[in-house]
Image (cartoon, rainbow, N blue to C red):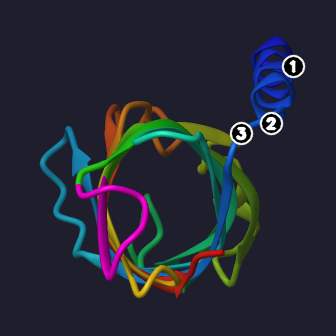
Amino acid sequence: MTKYFFILAMFLGMTLQAQNLRFNPKVGAGFYDFNVSKGTDVDPKIMVTLGCDVRIGSGNLFFNTGLHYSADAFNKDANTFSEKGSINFLRVPVGVGYYITGRDGILSLHLKGGLVNNFNISNSGLGKDFDSLVKKYNLAGNLGLGAEVLKFIHIGVEYDLGLTNYFDTDDILVAKKGAFLISLGVTF
């Protein structure tokens, strides 16, 4: 894992030279659910995010990364489905994007996709036993559509598809998270 981030940091350092940067602080909200293998239904829940994306590139193609705080509202324990609280993550997206209508103009549309690294930083209100049930790291594939209005107002829609198991327990063999997010922010 350390090698992965070291290589990413080197790549970022090299691409920052003579490249255009766009910063995109944003706040988002959405819904998430799990694909659970043992037939247990888990109702969709609210997810909120706060963070910043960074787009690096001078043409229509760009490298996309960032850092986001994410809180997954969770109203049921993975085993007993009885407790309420939140699971808090640091999300680190790593992907590429393409400006469909160009970078500048009254309306600029872009597609982006890649991987989202989710690092569990804390769980609140879910009990001490719950801490061992949530994996400390999970990975998701990401696909999104974004728009900049008047070059600085950002509106985005994204979908994260879980690629690894969200829980670290034998009781739930596969519980991959899927999340739909809508975000609003600024771009400069």
User: Which of 28 and 42 lies nearest the eye of the viewer?
Assistant: 28
Rounded to the nearest angstrom, the CA distance separating label 2 from label 3 is: 5 Å
Could you tell me which secondary element the residue under label 1 belongs to? helix
Q: Is residue 128 magenta?
A: no
Q: Please report the bounds of the magenta region as a residue range.
A: 101-110
Instruction: Tell me which residue sits at (19%, 41%) in the image.
Output: 38
Is 81 situated above or below 109? below
User: Which of 19 and 26 lies nearest the eye of the viewer?
Assistant: 19
Q: Which residue is mark 3?
A: 19
Q: Residues within 10 Å of mark 1 (few under 14, many from 20)?
A: few
Please provide percent x and percent y for residue 69.
Answer: 69, 70
Which mark is first along the chain, 1 or 2? 1
Q: Which residue is mark 1?
A: 6
Q: Which residue is mark 2?
A: 16
Please provide percent x and percent y for residue 161.
Answer: 30, 45
Mark drawn on residue 48: none
Q: Is residue 102 magenta?
A: yes
Mark 3 and mark 1 in contact? Answer it, CB < 8 Å.
no
Of circles 2 and 1, the one toward us is 2
Mark 2 and mark 3 in contact? Answer it, CB < 8 Å.
yes
Rounded to the nearest angstrom, the CA distance separating label 3 from label 1 is: 20 Å
Quarter of the rendering containing residue 27: bottom right
Instruction: Tell me which residue sits at (42%, 84%) in the image.
Output: 29
Q: Is residue 139 left or right of residue 128?
A: left
Rounded to the nearest angstrom, the CA distance separating label 2 from label 1 is: 15 Å
Q: Overall secondary structure of the magenta stretch?
A: loop
Could you tell me which secondary element the residue under label 2 belongs to? helix
Q: Is residue 171 left or right of residue 120?
A: left
Quarter of the rendering containing residue 131: bottom right
Which mark is first along the chain, 1 or 3? 1
**Identity, as a three-letter code, of the amino acid under mark 1:** Phe
Of circles 3 and 1, the one toward us is 3
